[in-house]
Every structure is written in structure tokens, then in C-alpha cells.
């Protein structure tokens, strides 16, 4: 049985939680949950000039939106706050004093430096990249405490990871070069080394470093664009890890069940917006109707659509009629506006494409259509097909004006399902507005 892992996500509050940080946090969270262990949030705020409380709050909001809950930390009124390096300075200074007393470090003014011993082969087995080795001769002495009294990254993480009993250090591959320096400190302090696993780089579809245009933005911005946290979780989990070729859409619980660090690849992962859109669309399609409504409703309100003029049941079932169209909640809102109001239809369509000689045919057809005893999609479609055959009229010549008059769009869900959802009277009102009924 896999040992219970203690892992940490340790961002610097010098910016928002971006895709790379969210990816690292998610893999740590998955490993903690898979092993029944603990996921710890540690804010590395020793850069006094750039660290801000606003960025710290933004990082935590991004984690909470992704559903990456942490397991311990200072009490903040019924929930855990993060650990902060700025609140642990005594620990760093005491440990540095110990190394100075043992002759393994020295003072240079107000700074403290670790004395790198020569001729040491620094080797570790990376969970992802395999065996990595570096000679200590290639390293300069390591600054531990800066002249302003703050610890450096390479020193503080060793002290924190030891005292927090971290079993696995899972972080981006750009930290591989830092690991030998940290190993020297572990060994000098006679502390047990954790396991290391470095995650692959995330590239754009052009195989270059991820740019903002290609997705290198705050994870929180994806919420505002209409992406679901479950979709972003699913997508980020697939960057550098596979749940199996036939299993690209999965829940958090399913991911926790099957996640293995040993299956993380060292090949760079590609941030593909098309893939994210596909995953998001699938998650929206599979949602409970009223949960889907809650996701889409804010975007309808942004569009000033009369949400409150309709019942919750009508709105939820209207999204069911949409049948999975729309890759984001924002798109779904745009594709479904005609269910809430006739105004967007009139803005998109004026009926001018229907020629004068077509009107008698349309008026005769719609006159009979609106006289049907049942206003059900199946009855509407059957009647339309039979009428077009009997009258020698192509079905698209009568169905397309119907679609345009009801939705204002050339592409929509089945127009007979739309008509049933709108109801006989609302459908009649829209057709009459364009003069298609006599």
C-alpha cells in the first residue's frame, strides 16, 4: 500500500495563480488525496518588495475555485490559513546558527552562506525524470540568509519541508537545477531527504513557452470566461499525465482513484484551448439541469435578458433543448438568448431574405401548422414533412424561415423542439411579427 504522502504547494505572492502554479498545486493535491495524506499550503513571502496580501488572497481564491482544499495551517476562524515563511524567521535563523557553529556555514557581514564541500556527487532519483547527478564542484557557496535577514529560496524550502515532514516535493521542472543545492543542505543538517518529482513544462500549441495569448493567464480569469472548475481540473490533470486513452473526461473522485506519480511524463505538455473547450463542453452537457442553469444565469444577466420573467423549470429545460451546444457557459448563454426574449431575434433577423412570392406558401403552411391539435415537436416535424411532400415544397424553404423567425440564427437545436419549448403562442407571435402568417 502507498504510504500517506505529505505534500505542499508553495507559491510566492508576487502575482496571481497562473496555469503553471495551478497545475503544480493540482498534482500535489491529487497525490495527497490518492494516498490519503495531507496537502499543505505554504506562502513563500520572503521577497518583501514584491509580495502582497492582495496576491496571496488571489492565489487562495484560485485554489478554492479549483476545489484544491488544504488540510492544515493556522486557524482563521473555522478554516485553515496558509503557513507563511515571514512568520517562521526564527526557525531559519536558529538552523543557520547551528550550521555556522558546526563550521558548515559562515557569516559575511549580515549574510550567512553555506560552505559547499568539494568533490561530492549529488545524485537523486527523480520520480519523473529518473536518475540525476551533479558534482558539487560546479556550485558556488549557497546564500542562506540575506543581508536583510530574510532566508533565500533554496535554504528556506529545505528547513520548511523538513519541519513540515514533507514526504514528496512535487514542483515544476525548472526547479531541477535547485535540487542539488538543497540536497547539500539536507545532508549537512543530517536530515532525511524527501522524494522529488519534477513536472513537465507546459507549452503552447506552437511548442514554445506558454504565452498569455495561448493560455498563460490567471486561473480565475477562466471562471469569468465561463469555464467550470471541474473542467479546468480535468484539463490540468491531463497536462503531463494520462488517465488512459479512453478516459479523457473524469470527475475529481475518479482522478483521485487512478492518479499515480509514476505515470507523469517528462515530455512537455501542450496547453490546447481546443481540448479545454471540448472538456468544458462535455462537463456542461453532463451537468444536472439546475446546476447548469446556475452556471449560465450570471451570463444571461450580463446580457440584460429577462431571467426573472421565466420559471426556473422553463429556463433549465430550455438549456436541455440546447443539447450540449456551447463550449463555455458564456457561449451557452449567447446560444440560448432567444428562449428568454424575442428582442435578440429581432436584432439578428428582419425577414428580408423571404421573397414576396414565397409569402403565400408560408402563410398557408403556418396557418395549418398553428391549427394542429397538439404542439409537440414530433407532431410538428411529421406534419411539416408530410405537408412539404404533398405541396411539392422543399422542406428547407418552410423550415428555415421558421428557424430564423424563432431564433434569429441559421444554426440552432432542432427547430421543432425549440418551437415546443417556446410554446404555440410565443411561436405564433414571432412568426406574425415577420408577416409570415396571414
Image: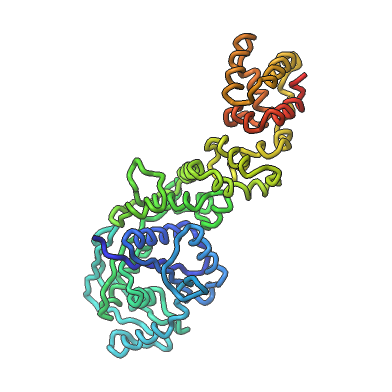
Would you place residue 12 above or below residue 363 in this image?
below
For the view shown, which residue lies furthest in the bottom direction? Answer: 101
The structure residue drawn at horizontal position 43% and vertical position 81%, both measured from the top left corner, is 88
Q: Is residue 304 left or right of residue 90?
A: right
* Residue 318 falls in image quadrant: top right
Q: Nearer the viewer, residue 258 or 85?
A: 258
Q: Is residue 169 left or right of residue 421?
A: left
The structure residue drawn at horizontal position 36% and vertical position 55%, both measured from the top left corner, is 256
Q: Is residue 313 left or right of residue 345?
A: left
Is there any visible trace of residue 78 in the rendered image? Answer: yes
Q: In which quadrant is the N terminus drawn?
A: bottom left
The structure residue drawn at horizontal position 37% and vertical position 58%, both measured from the top left corner, is 30
Q: In which quadrant is the C terminus drawn?
A: top right
The structure residue drawn at horizontal position 56% and vertical position 46%, both measured from the top left corner, is 290
Q: Nearer the viewer, residue 42 or 51?
A: 42
Q: Nearer the viewer, residue 398 or 187?
A: 398
Is there any visible trace of residue 274 in the rendered image? Answer: no
Task: Give the image location of residue 15, x and y in percent.
Answer: 53, 65
Would you place residue 403 above or below residue 4 in this image?
above
Q: Is residue 331 left or right of residue 22?
A: right
Query: How is the structure coloured here?
Result: rainbow
Task: Give the image location of residue 134, x and y in percent.
Answer: 26, 67
Task: Give the image location of residue 311, x and y in percent.
Answer: 65, 43
* Residue 10 falls in image quadrant: bottom left
Task: Give the image location of residue 393, x and y in percent.
Answer: 63, 12
Total count of labels: 0
Amino acid at each position: 500500500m502507498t504510504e500517506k504522502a505529505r505534500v505542499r504547494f508553495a507559491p510566492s505572492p508576487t502575482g496571481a495563480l497562473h496555469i503553471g502554479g495551478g497545475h503544480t498545486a493540482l498534482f500535489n493535491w491529487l497525490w495527497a488525496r490518492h494516498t490519503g495524506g495531507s496537502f499543505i499550503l505554504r506562502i513563500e513571502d520572503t521577497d518583501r518588495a514584491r509580495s502582497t496580501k492582495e496576491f496571496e488572497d488571489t492565489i487562495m481564491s484560485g485554489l478554492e475555485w479549483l476545489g484544491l482544499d488544504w488540510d492544515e495551517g493556522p486557524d482563521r476562524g473555522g478554516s485553515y490559513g496558509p503557513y507563511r515563511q515571514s512568520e517562521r524567521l526564527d526557525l531559519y535563523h536558529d538552523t543557520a546558527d547551528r550550521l555556522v557553529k558546526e563550521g558548515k556555514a559562515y557569516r559575511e557581514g549580515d549574510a550567512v552562506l553555506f560552505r559547499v564541500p568539494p568533490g561530492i556527487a549529488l545524485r537523486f532519483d527523480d520520480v519523473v525524470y529518473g536518475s540525476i547527478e551533479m558534482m558539487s564542484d560546479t556550485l558556488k557557496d549557497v546564500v542562506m540568509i540575506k543581508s536583510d535577514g530574510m532566508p533565500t529560496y533554496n535554504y528556506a524550502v529545505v528547513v520548511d519541508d523538513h519541519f513540515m515532514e514533507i514526504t514528496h516535493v512535487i514542483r515544476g521542472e525548472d526547479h531541477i537545477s535547485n535540487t542539488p543545492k538543497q540536497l547539500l543542505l539536507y545532508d549537512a543538517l543530517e536530515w532525511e531527504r524527501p522524494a522529488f518529482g519534477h513536472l513537465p513544462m507546459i507549452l503552447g500549441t506552437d511548442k514554445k513557452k506558454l504565452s498569455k495569448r495561448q493560455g498563460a493567464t490567471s486561473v480565475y480569469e477562466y471562471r469569468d470566461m465561463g469555464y467550470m472548475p471541474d473542467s479546468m481540473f480535468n484539463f490540468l490533470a491531463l497536462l503531463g499525465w494520462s488517465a488512459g486513452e479512453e478516459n479523457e473526461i473524469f470527475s475529481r473522485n475518479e482522478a483521485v482513484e487512478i492518479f499515480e506519480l509514476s505515470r507523469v511524463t517528462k515530455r512537455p505538455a501542450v496547453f490546447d484551448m481546443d481540448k479545454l473547450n471540448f472538456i468544458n463542453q462535455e462537463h456542461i452537457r453532463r451537468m444536472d439541469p439546475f446546476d447548469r442553469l446556475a452556471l449560465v444565469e450570471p451570463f444571461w444577466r450580463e446580457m440584460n435578458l429577462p431571467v426573472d420573467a421565466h420559471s426556473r423549470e422553463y429556463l433549465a429545460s430550455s438549456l436541455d433543448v440546447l443539447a450540449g451546444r456551447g463550449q463555455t457557459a458564456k457561449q451557452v448563454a449567447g446560444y440560448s438568448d432567444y428562449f428568454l426574449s424575442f428582442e435578440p431575434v429581432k436584432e439578428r433577423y428582419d425577414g428580408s431574405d423571404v421573397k414576396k412570392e414565397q409569402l403565400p406558401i408560408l402563410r398557408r403552411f403556418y396557418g395549418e401548422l398553428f391549427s394542429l391539435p397538439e404542439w409537440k415537436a414530433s407532431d410538428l416535424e411529421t406534419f411539416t414533412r408530410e405537408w412539404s411532400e404533398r405541396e411539392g415544397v422543399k422542406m428547407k424553404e418552410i423550415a428555415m424561415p421558421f428557424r430564423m423567425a424563432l431564433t434569429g440564427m441559421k444554426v440552432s437545436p432542432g427547430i421543432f423542439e425549440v418551437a415546443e419549448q417556446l410554446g404555440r403562442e410565443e411561436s405564433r407571435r414571432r412568426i406574425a411579427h415577420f408577416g409570415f402568417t396571414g
